[in-house]
Image (tube, rainbow, N blue to C red):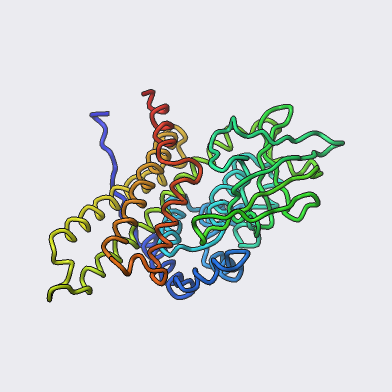
Amino acid sequence: MADQALDVDFALNEAQEMLRQTTRQFLADRVPLEAVRQLADTEAGFDEKLWQAGAELGWHSLAIPEEYGGAGYTFAELSIVLEELGRALFPGPFLSTVVMAADAILTAGTEDQKQAHLPAIARGERTVGVALFEGPRGANLDDISMAAEPSGDGWVLTGTKTNVVFGQAVDTILVAARTAGGLSLFLIPSGTPGVSHEAVPTLDPTTKQAQLTFTTVSVGPEALLGREGAAGPVIERILRLAAVGLSLDQVGGAQWCLETSVEHGKTRFQFGRAIGSFQSIKHRCADMLVEVEHARSAAYHAARVTGDEEELVIAAPLAKSVCSDAYEHVAGETIQILGGTGFSWEHSVHLYFKRAKSTALMFGDARYHRRLLADALGL
């Protein structure tokens, strides 16, 4: 390692910078924080027209190969959109659909399944909820106990999945269940008889969650994604991708908090001077900047090694733990710097604080991911 040069240049090229700017401008114009608040009060939690508009901008197709209707880019380009979505608190099943489900289908699906689902995801015509665990803070594959029994040439699924992000609004569910051969994945339309959902109260109102109940749900053989009993490595991979996607969301949100704190420091006056001129505020903002840049470096690195499983095993939990801690701290500091304004319901900083807390717990908290990292390093 000492003789190897480490490439830490995360600068965006011209096309990537254009993607960032167009994404940010679209979100500022079409999804301001006032709109996010309004969507948080709806049952679905997101706007299908906005979802389709994002697909038309090319967000959904970025990391999907061209032969399946995608743009054929990499996770590095997708990471730019993920960060900007986090900065704007964009509500919708983007992580579960575009990151997790699309990759699972691409990795494990048959050719027919890829042709059936990936172009629809790329066009924004399909939304997917990922139903893996049965506990509120599940992240271990051993905790998956839902059963799928053979029935004729198909399957019957029975059980309950908790905390399915946007599970009440998506049109397709990616479900993990145990068959005689082991862990398997199934793609099931949410309107299939026997599938019901119940809203789950959450800390973060911008990210709806639901409990899904499967009561003797009968599906055909085409619902099985790939081979029976071979889903373990696929689930592990999409959980790592989810960790990277959440890390980028956290970086975007932390950046908004930093910018908001600095702007408040410039415009809020006490004792005849801007509070940003006080040493205590300067030190806090400087520490926040270091944390945000540290988190960004970890998340960007993880995004760029998603094609290398050996690297991703280390980079994903590293990014998730670092970014979770950074977002929580920076959001909390922003509330303190804003003073009474930061504690008001009218200001949007509380939404970022709630998103920080929610994403920190999703698919395993920072402590859990540090254990994964230690195990990967043999510590």
Q: Can residue 219 be seen in this view?
A: no
Q: Nearer the viewer, residue 302 or 257?
A: 257
Q: Residue at x 38, y 70 (%)?
A: 347
With respect to residue 181, does 158 lie above or below? Answer: below
What residue is rendered at 58% in x and 33% in y? 141
Instruction: Please identify the quarter of the rendering in which residue 107 is found.
Output: top right
Q: In which quarter of the image is the N terminus?
A: top left
- Residue 360, percent from left and from top: 43, 47
Question: In the rendering, at what x and y percent does residue 178 appear?
Answer: 69, 32
Query: Residue 191 in the image: x percent, y percent?
Result: 76, 56
Residue 75 horizontal side relative to residue 217, left or right? left
Residue at the extreme top: 378
In the rendering, at what x and y percent does residue 44 appear?
A: 62, 64
* Residue 64 or residue 192, whichever sits in front: 192
Q: In the displayed structure, does residue 48 sit left or right of residue 80?
A: right
**Residue, far right:** 152
What residue is at 43 percent from the left and 62 percent from the top?
351
Q: Is residue 199 visible?
A: yes
Number of marks in picture: 0
For the C terminus, the image quarter is top left
Residue 19 lies left or right of residue 7; in this view the side is right
